[in-house]
Image (spheres, grey):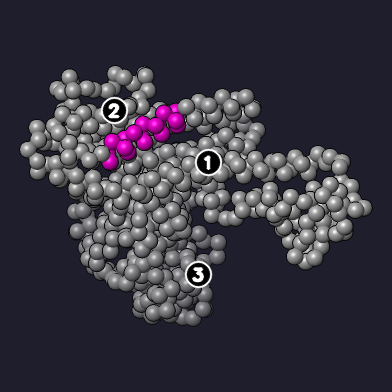
Amino acid sequence: MDDYYTADEEDCYYSSDHDESLGGIDNDDSEFHAASSKKSTTQVITQESLLAAQREDLLRVMELLSIKEHHARTLLIHYQWDIEKLISVFVEKGKDSLFSGAGVTVFDSSSLPSSSPNMSCDVCLEDVVAEQMKRMDCGHCFCNDCWTEHFTVQINEGQSKRIRCMAHKCNAICDEDVVRSLVSKKRPDLAEKFDRFLVESYIEDNKMVKWCPSTPHCGNAIRAEDDKLCEVECSCGLQFCFSCMCQAHSPCSCLMWELWRKKCRDESETVNWITVHTKLCPKCYKPVEKNGGCNLVRCICGQYFCWLCGGATGKEHTYRSIAGHSCGRYEDDKERQMERAKRDLDRYTHYHHRYKAHTDSSKLEDKLRNTILEKVSNSEKKELKLKDFTWVTNGLNRLFRSRRILSYSYAFAYYMFGEELFKDEMSSSEREMKKNLFEDQQQQLEGNVEKLSQLLEEPFDDFSDDKVMDVRIHVINLSVAVDSLCKKMYECIENDLLGSLQSGIHNIAPYSSKGIEQAAEFHASWSSSKALDSSGTSGETSRPEKASGSRDSEDMVCSSSKKRPRREGSFTNSKVTLLDLNLPADFMDQN
């Protein structure tokens, strides 16, 4: 068989004379046993585990600062649930500065004189019995009716997560238990809305937690522990970029991918084609395409004009000239503009054609998965010397990963070596040198990927033992080569191409030989779970349906916003009934 390997990787390949060394290569997972034993950097937070995840962070802050739960929540919402940042402020500026910045006030009620049976409310100026007055942590005391009206207005205006005291120039955040208690008496629907916003704040205000952008929504959220610049696979099967919430698009940066999607979606290149191949009629200004050899063109509006210069003329003409018209003078700017438009169109067509070709190949190979697995099943039933066919599935997975990378590498190259983003960042000679470096690696990867695809489509279930072993060795070698070439391409992009640029906005998710990381299921720690159970905050929810959309649908992913639609349902805790996170906000407002 003809092999397409690079010379510097011959040490990675094996032949039938090295059967002892093939045992560890058969299973792709064995190469990365050490990596897989590490803790996953991303976690799936389901509806059932959302309260536990939120409670775990609350308990850390409560134990660290010895404060109540609503104070801890106020601090975390202010610092966007970034515990490391909260601790940093606490260490550098102290507890008082930490509290005052977030609106947390701890008032010593023991210093107050004994309250009289009747008290005056400073808002409504009514005398109210002491039992109908409520004092906040900041020390301000008003009647329950005034507090309730204040809370109602704030919740309706979307300020549920940080309702401030209504005293003049007081920035203290009100106790959520007081808010819930007073509002639920007159407006139970608003109390439920208030609780829903508090729970949702863990995702909406948290930079490290985002909703899965699947459509229909799977009900899950993803938490990234360390790096926000990563690609992740939700438990519903959807793969997406955690940074921009679009489909996984490395080695493109988020900005490159957004520009490429827009360019492929809108009619910008159609406009370029019209510019190159048509001229505007000088009378009606509609584009006219020339379909004959004569330079005198007639528009459907009846106007005659010269194809060379676009100027209006009469209809009298010969093959060589038009009566009363001469346009032999060269116009530099106009010619240059036409040439530039044609060159841009040809360049876009080149990259888009190859991007589309690999995307289509990936879809066709995905359809062949069942066929290839069927051949594996047939081979396992035969009396062959080779019993383990994991090399087929491993090679198939490697093919899918490399196809995706190849496809997006053309979108990356279009912007990397064009003038749209990096015109002033590189000289022409430097751009050409980097372009040749990247295209050499891209070509090597492309050749090996095509060879791997061809081998996997072989009818190996009909082959003899020796030929199956030969195919096996070639598939393993090509899988290793493709993995190595993908890794080198990413290193080239990160170090030689993007790393040398002044602007640091173009960063890509790191390459992983195992493919896009699947987020692990979130499990609360023992102390957190125990505290959760003892406080009675655990509840029951209906399990969300799985997303039915394809993981490769780019419009499906990118059209989804961070805040997801919700489905109907509810769950309860010991204090109050909390709404299911899948209930739409407008539905709750109406009810």
* Residue behind mark 1: 351
In the picture, the disc for residue 214 is: none
Secondary structure of the residue carrying numbered label 3: loop
Q: Earlier in the sequence, mark 2 or mark 3?
A: 2
Going by the numbered disc 3, the residue's amino acid type is: Glu
Residue situated in front as seen by the camera: 289 or 506: 289
Residue depth check, mark 2 versus mark 1: number of the one nearer the observer: 2
Q: Residue at x 72, y 44 (%)?
A: 338
Left or right: where does residue 579 sit relative to residue 16?
A: right
Is any atom of residue 550 visible in this view?
Answer: yes
Residue depth check, mark 2 versus mark 3: number of the one nearer the observer: 2
Q: Earlier in the sequence, mark 2 or mark 1?
A: 2
Answer with the quarter of the image where residue 533 lies.
Answer: bottom left
Verify whether residue 442 appears in magenta.
yes
Left or right: where does residue 419 sit relative to residue 43?
A: right
Q: Earlier in the sequence, mark 3 or mark 1?
A: 3
Residue situated in front as seen by the camera: 193 or 453: 453
* Residue behind mark 3: 157
Secondary structure of the residue carrying numbered label 1: helix
